[in-house]
Amino acid sequence: MSLLLRLAGLGLPAALRRRKARELYALTAGCFGVSWPSGGPPGPGSELERFAVLTRGLVDKFRAEGKPLAPVKADLRGRALAFGRNLRRSFRVRHPGDAVRLLRLAYAAVGIDLRAGEGGAITVSRCFFSRHYTPETCRVIASLDEGLMAGILGEGGLEFTCRITEGHKECRAVFRLPGDGP
């Protein structure tokens, strides 16, 4: 395991966590054609909460205006893929176990308790965003998850079988690497 990843496991410095979160917020907002201010949009609550409210509002606005979400989803995946690859390089990930550790750390930084298991099984038992997102918002933002996972774990696809936002007690999905069976 790389020294950086080992140190990150002890706790990411708050400044680094904030910087990376803001990069993620900015890339997400950019996919919707808006910008993310350096301190986040003004308003009550944490920056993470303001981000959740903003992204839900953007998805709702696109739907209400009849704008297509497919290009947004493709952009979210592509930008998150680059972001995930950058994290993988920054933390000097070289082994699959290290990639899973980095993935868990990245998700924990935004209030998501993610577990990765055999065969690409992904389980989320706690998700900060589930209090703010509709099932539609979750389906759109899942493109961000797919890209981030592909950047950290290796190119692949993410398929959800259930989501907290749909009333389930946890989210379950499978991340498949190219060449993995169904």
Image: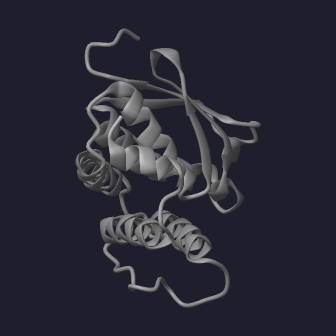
> x and y percent of residue 81 in the render?
27, 47
Residue at 56% across / 51% down in the picture? 108
Residue at 42% across / 43% down in the picture? 102
Q: Picture quarter containing residue 83?
A: bottom left
> x and y percent of residue 180 in the render?
33, 13
Is any part of residue 168 visible from this angle? yes
Q: Is residue 97 left or right of residue 137?
A: left
| 165 versus 48 height, above or below | above
> x and y percent of residue 97 in the render?
41, 27
| 20 versus 162 height, above or below | below
**Residue closer to the observer: 95 or 180:** 95
Residue at 46% across / 29% down in the picture? 159
Q: Is residue 163 left or right of residue 82?
A: right
Residue at 48% across / 59% down in the picture? 12
Is any part of residue 140 visible from this angle? no
Q: Is residue 3 left or right of residue 107?
A: left
Q: Picture quarter containing residue 56?
A: bottom right
* Residue projecting furthest to the top: 181
Q: Quadrant of the C terminus?
A: top left
